[in-house]
Image: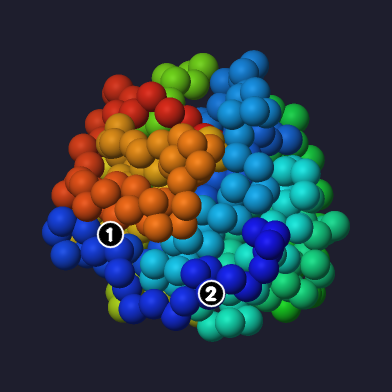
Amino acid sequence: MTPYDDSPAQAVHAAPRLIDGFGRAVTYLRVSVTDRCDLRCLYCMSEHMTFLPKAQVLTLEELDRLASTFVGLGVRKLRLTGGEPLVRKGFMDLVAGLSRHLRSGALDELTLTTNGTQLERYAADLARHGVRRINVSLDTLKPDLFRKLTRGGDLTRVIAGIDAALAAGIAVKINAVALKADNAAELPDLIQWAHARGCDMTLIETMPMGEVDQDRTDQYLSLQDVRRDLSSFWTLEDIHHATGGPARYVRVAETGGRLGLITPLSNHFCDTCNRVRLTCTGTLHTCLGRDDASDLRAVIRGGANDAQLREAIFAAIGSKPKGHDFQIAHPAVARHMSTTGG
Ligand code: SAM
Ligand code: SF4
C-alpha cells in the first residue's frame, strides 16, 4: 500500500478528537515542508543560512503520513508552508496526494503560504488539486525595496504569480509584515492595491523568532499604531471573522476590502487557539511562542504503527501550553520562522 492510498485509517470522518488540556479542539495543522527558500527576507533569515541536511527533513511520504494521521484525528484545515513550499521538489505530488482528503470530505481546506515567486508556474495545478485560497507574502510594491527586504527577490515574478493564482480562480490573501523603517508609510497603498484586486490583506507584527542579522527592535511597529493612523483617513469597521487565530478583522469602508491585524505581541489570542505546527523535521510544536516540542519523526522512523503514532500525537496535544510569552528584544524561541512555518 502506498502512502497515497485511501486507507480506512486515513479517511476516517472524525469528530474533533484532538482536545488539549484546556478544552480547545485542534482542527488546524500547519506543516512546514522545507526549511529552504529562494528568498532571504531580512526579518526571517540570516544572509548565509545553513539549511538542514536532507536526511533530517521528512520525505514526501512521511509528510503525507503525518498530515493524514492528523486529518484522521479531526484536523479540518491543512496549511502547507516553509521555507518556501513551492521550491520543495515533488511538492505538487504531495498536494495531489493530500487532495484525496478534500474529495473524501475529511478535510475542509488545503492551502498554502507562499512567497509567490513560483506561483505563475504552479497556480493552475494548485487549483486543479482543490486549493481554493492561498496566502502570498508581500511587504512592498516598490521593486528596489522588495529586492532589499528579500535580499535579491524580483517583485515582478510575485505579482505575476498573484495574477496567475487569481486567474486560476484561487482567492489570494496578501500578508505583509509591518516594518517601521521600511514599509510603514506604504501600508495604505499596499492595502488599496490588494483590495482593488479583490484580495484580503493581513498585516503582521514582527515576531522574535530566531536570530537574524539585524536588530529587530528597530523594525517593530505596533499594529495598534497602524490602526490608529489608518483610522485618521479611513473608516475601519470591526467585523466578526473568527479563525481561531491571532488575526482581528476590520472592513475598510472606502475600499470595501477586509483587513486582518495579527498582533501576537500586543494582544493575547491563546484562548481560542485551534492550531498546531509540524516542522519539516517532524517536530510538533503545539504553541508558536514556546519551546515545547514532540519528535514525531523519531516515532515514525522508529517503526511506529498507526495506533502508536496516534498515541504520540495525543500525548503531545495533551500538553499544549495555555499561552505564549513573546518579548520583542529577545527571541522567545531560538527556531526560525522558516523552520517552524509561519
Ligand atoms: N516562504 C513563505 C512566505 O514567505 O510566505 C512561507 C513561509 S514564511 C516563514 C511565512 C510567513 O512568516 C511570511 O508571511 C513571513 O512574512 C512571515 N515571517 C517570517 N519571519 C517573521 C518574523 N520574524 N515576524 C513576523 N512574520 C514573519
Ligand atoms: Fe523565505 Fe518566506 Fe522566510 Fe521570506 S519569509 S525568507 S520568503 S521563508
| Residue highlighted by disc 1 | 273
Is residue 235 visible in this depiction of the protein? no
Q: Quadrant of residue 87?
A: top right
**Disc nearer the start of the sequence (2/1):** 2
- Secondary structure under tag 2 reads helix
The amino acid type of the residue labelled 2 equals Pro
In the rendered image, the quadrant that contains the N terminus is bottom right
Colour scheme employed for the rendering of this structure: rainbow
Task: Describe residue 4's horizontal placement relative to residue 201 as left or right.
Answer: right
In the rendered view, tell whether residue 330 sits above or below residue 245.
Answer: above
Q: Residues within 10 Å of mark 2 (few under 14, many from 20)?
A: few
Task: Describe residue 304's horizontal placement relative to residue 172 as left or right.
Answer: left
The amino acid type of the residue labelled 1 equals Cys
Image x and y of residue 183, in percent: 53, 42
| Residue highlighted by disc 2 | 8
Q: Residue at x 14, y 59 (%)?
A: 22
Query: Which numbered disc, 2 or 1, marks the residue closer to the eye?
Result: 2
Q: Residue at x 59, y 77 (%)?
A: 102
